[in-house]
């Protein structure tokens, strides 16, 4: 792979406040062999007018009826001409060395299918900034994914197009965890790494599309658990998928938190001496988030639900040990 074309995929919906800075951050990349594809899902503000003013020969804009995040990205990636895909959400920006760094990793390490980076977050209300580091080891990233820890920020991710196509892209069945679901499937196919340098800035917004416009009634934990079970059981049919959904609906949010805590708790202590400091921190963070579920008799509760709902308990035991 010699200086591959990188296709940068950006979803927009009412992003007028942010889109100019987003596009400028791409223009300012030190690596210049790229194209940016923007998929606008029915914006009603001035997003499209701003894009028209800043249009250039490497920027392509497509307008589609309002659709899901994964669906819009699949649409954009089908239009891509590059061998490498980079994700950059409309309210985020890439620092100048981001694409160059990720291309360098993918060119030097042929077994690496995807590479993310550390990030800086910016709270748009308070202007407070934070730096977040993630595990760099592919083994530890895969371990975290297998027990439901969404370990990498998707707006910092770049991956090989052929690997993306081999796992059939973003799933239409996991709309609130489409990023996690893709990484989980890619981790079976090859290695995923993270560069411990902040190369993207992620906006923290209470009014983001992820909070406002995604499906109601089932949160990201539901779809993370669904992805893990469906992936491990190699679910094929809509009937099987519906069976898993009904089972998780029966658990309710409290039960799903319980189940994720159980998987993560077992995996954490089974692999404790193999984990680096950064991975330990992310495991502990996730365990704390789900800690309230453990107050309800974790083992007995989980066993009762697993057996009564018809999901094979041996799956949970074997999967949590991986």
Image (cartoon, helix red, strand yellow):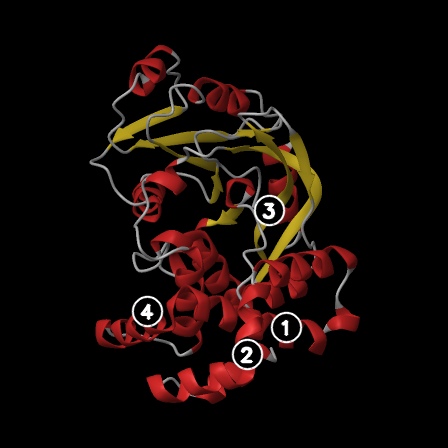
- Residue 310 visible from this viewpoint: no
Mark in the foreground, 4 or 3 = 4
Q: Do the CB atoms of the residues marked 1 and 4 lie less than 8 Å apart? A: no
Q: Earlier in the sequence, mark 3 or mark 1?
A: 3
**Which residue is denoted by mark 1 in the rendering?**
265
**Which residue is denoted by mark 2 in the rendering?**
298
Question: 164 or 69: nearer the eye?
Answer: 69
Residue visible at 57% across and 37% down? 3
Categorize mark 4 by other alpha carbons within 10 Å: few (<14), some (14-19), many (20+). Answer: some
Mark in the foreground, 1 or 2 = 2
Q: Position of residue 31 (x, y in %)?
A: 59, 29
Alpha-carbon span between mark 2 and mark 4? 18 Å
Q: Position of residue 288 (x, y in %)?
A: 63, 60
Q: Do the CB atoms of the residues marked 4 and 3 lie less than 8 Å apart? A: no
* Above or below, 235 relative to 7: below
Q: Earlier in the sequence, mark 1 or mark 2?
A: 1
Element at label 4 = helix
Q: Do the CB atoms of the residues marked 1 and 2 lie less than 8 Å apart? A: yes
Quadrant in the picture for the C terminus: bottom right
Q: Going by the image, does 99 lie left or right of 75?
A: right
Alpha-carbon span between mark 1 and mark 2? 11 Å
**Which residue is denoted by mark 3 in the rendering?**
116
Q: Going by the image, does 78 lie left or right of 141?
A: left
Alpha-carbon span between mark 4 and mark 3? 32 Å
């Amino acid at each position: 792979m010699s200086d591959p074309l990188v296709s940068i995929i950006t979803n927009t919906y009412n992003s007028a406040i942010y889109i100019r800075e987003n596009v400028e951050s791409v223009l300012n990349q030190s690596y210049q062999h790229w194209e940016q594809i923007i998929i606008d899902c029915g914006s009603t503000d001035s997003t499209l007018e701003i894009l028209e003013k800043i249009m250039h020969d490497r920027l392509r804009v497509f307008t589609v009826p309002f659709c899901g995040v994964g669906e819009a990205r699949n649409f954009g990636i089908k239009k891509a001409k590059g061998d490498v895909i980079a994700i950059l959400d409309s309210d985020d920006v890439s620092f100048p060395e981001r694409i160059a760094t990720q291309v360098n990793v993918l060119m030097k390490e042929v077994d690496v299918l995807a590479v993310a980076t550390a990030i800086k977050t910016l709270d748009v209300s308070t202007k407070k900034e934070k730096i977040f580091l993630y595990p760099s080891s592919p083994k530890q990233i895969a371990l975290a994914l297998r027990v439901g820890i969404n370990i990498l920020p998707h707006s910092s991710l770049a991956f090989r197009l052929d690997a993306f196509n081999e796992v059939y892209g973003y799933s239409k069945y996991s709309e609130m965890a489409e990023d996690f679901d893709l990484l989980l499937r890619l981790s079976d196919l090859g290695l995923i790494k993270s560069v411990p340098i902040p190369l993207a800035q992620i906006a923290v917004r209470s009014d983001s599309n992820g909070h406002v416009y995604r499906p109601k009634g089932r949160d990201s934990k539901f779809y993370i658990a669904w992805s893990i079970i469906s992936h491990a059981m190699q679910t094929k049919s809509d009937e099987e998928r519906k069976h898993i959904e009904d089972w998780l609906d029966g658990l309710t949010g409290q039960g799903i938190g319980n189940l994720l805590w159980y998987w993560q708790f077992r995996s954490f202590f089974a692999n404790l001496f193999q984990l680096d400091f950064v991975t330990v921190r992310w495991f502990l963070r996730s365990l704390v988030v789900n800690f309230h579920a453990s107050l309800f008799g974790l083992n007995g509760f989980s066993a009762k639900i697993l057996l009564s709902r018809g999901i094979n308990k041996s799956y949970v035991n074997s999967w949590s040990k991986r």
